[in-house]
Amino acid sequence: TATATVEMSGYVVVPQGRIRVNNPTGDSVRISGGVLAAQFDVVDSRDTGPGTVSIGFIETIVQRKFRIESSNDAGREQSIAVVQINQTGANEVNTWVVQ
């Protein structure tokens, strides 16, 4: 009688197989790691026609690239760095030029 949420945080890979989500009670189902399959079938009690149960891709940013510029008031010295920061917090300096 209680609502349930099924969440698969890892990815599911069946390159020549089929993934079937059978959800007769219309509970929340989320696969956040990704799916690789030849076919994806959804049976859901909320279905009232084609495209009525949302299935889609939510883009997440896993890496950002930043350009950081700094200079002094006289304008003679300048520093330009291009860095990448990953979703995990890891970071790398791609280039860093000081003039």
Image: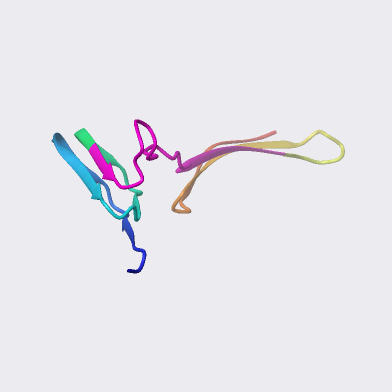
Between 88 and 3, the residue placed more toward the observer is 3
Query: x, y (%) of residue 3?
Result: 36, 64
Between 49 and 28, the residue placed more toward the observer is 49
* The magenta segment: 41-69
Q: Quadrant of residue 65?
A: top right
Q: Which corner quadrant holds the N terminus?
A: bottom left
Q: Which corner quadrant holds the C terminus?
A: top right
Name the residue: 46% across, 49% down: 87
Residue 89 sits inside the magenta stretch: no
Q: Quadrant of residue 62?
A: top left
> In this figure, what is the number of numbered marks?
0
Between 34 and 56, the residue placed more toward the observer is 56
Q: Residue furthest bottom?
A: 1
Majority secondary structure in the magenta region: loop
- Determine whether 88 is above or below 79 in the image: below
- Coloration mode: rainbow
Query: x, y (%) of residue 47?
Result: 34, 41
Residue 68 sits inside the magenta stretch: yes
- Determine whether 8 is above or below 94 in the image: below
